[in-house]
Amino acid sequence: MTQPDVVRTATVVAHYGVAVAVRLDSGALERVRVPRRTSLVVGDRVEIRGETLVRVEASRGVLRRRDSHGRIRSVASNLDCLGIVLAPRPDSPVGFVDRGLVAARAAGLSSFIVVNKSDLPGAAELHGTLEEAYGAEVSALLVSSVSGAGLTPLQSRLAEAGRGVFVGTSGVGKSSLFNALLPELELAVGEINEVSGLGRHVTSTATLHALPGGGEWIDTPGFRDFGPVEVSPAQLAAFFPGFESVLEGGCHFRDCLHRSEPGCCVLEGVGTGLITDQRHAAYLSLLGELEVAHAPRSGGPK
Ligand SMILES: Nc1nc2c(ncn2[C@@H]2O[C@H](COP(=O)(O)OP(=O)(O)OP(=O)(O)O)[C@@H](O)[C@H]2O)c(=O)[nH]1
Ligand SMILES: [Mg+2]
């Protein structure tokens, strides 16, 4: 029986609205009631007295995103790594990988890309395109949860990474990958909608899983909007994938936005081919979005 005065520490492994599932440091799993709309996320460290949650420890490595309504959402906490999952079907929004990589770097996380459904046409091409765009800095693994191809290298990568979270649009196969990596797990998976070509938002809550090969990874509900949080327009370039080598020595100008400033190191990199026009255009598109998000709100007191 639970001793009411003993404080026990635990990790949140799932959030069900009015309750969370926690893994006690002893290894046992328990459910603890929490107030609705609590800001707890999977990965949080908590203290429990009896059956009551009494404290949430400060967390590090929190992945946050801004959704399409401008709301800031925490995806998970105490992370080391972000795995961005894509597939040939359904496709992911333009700029999804850039946004994910920027968000990961801003949160101090390592990151890599997983192209799932290697058994389907278009997967190898997608993998090739991603390798070309990001290969120098970010690795991309080609796998299939159906055929099992690439799962052994994926398992090693997940173990090396420590605590991580898979994100990706609905239907790319995040939960299927967990089921393939953990044979006793039976996470719900869903068919792609034949008409829209989109996933059906099958997973509704994030869940943390200790993998047999090592590492603890979190499955999440799919989302398409991945606005970076806590990255100002002036900071974006430092996190933007593909700009690393030209920014090593710093730009001539403090607070340079690398848009049209003469003598800017990024524009020089575009000129010499170190940065492709596509990478620079992707940067400018995200920069424009961050400028809108950071613009002072109009309509306030005069
Ligand atoms: N051909 C093929 N289909 C796959 C593969 N992995 C997953 N699928 C299928 O893709 C569909 C979506 O898989 P899920 O695992 O539910 O996708 P999810 O990313 O978890 O989706 P949400 O939970 O909605 O975010 C299912 O029909 C799976 O059977 C794969 O490697 N190859
Ligand atoms: Mg899922």
Image (cartoon, rainbow, N blue to C red):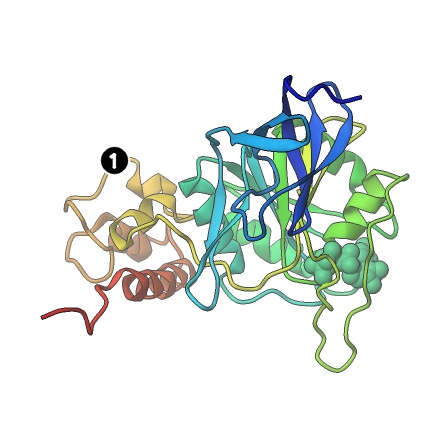
Q: Is residue 47 left or right of residue 188?
A: left
- Residue placed most toward the observer, 285 or 74: 74
- Residue placed most toward the observer, 184 or 195: 184
Quadrant observed for ligand 2 in the rendered image: bottom right
Q: Position of residue 29 (x, y in %)?
A: 77, 31
Residue located 72% across and 75% down the image: 197
Q: Is residue 272 left or right of residue 58?
A: left
- Residue placed most toward the observer, 291 or 266: 291
Q: Position of residue 268 (x, y in %)?
A: 25, 52
Residue located 76% across and 51% down the image: 175
Residue position for label 1? 249
Residue located 55% across and 34% down the image: 79
Toward the left, the furthest residue is 302
Q: Amino acid at mark 1?
A: Gly
Image quadrant containing the N terminus: top right
Toward the right, the furthest residue is 184
- Residue placed most toward the observer, 62 or 160: 62
**Total numbered labels:** 1
Image quadrant containing the C terminus: bottom left
Q: In the rendered image, is residue 119 in sight?
A: no
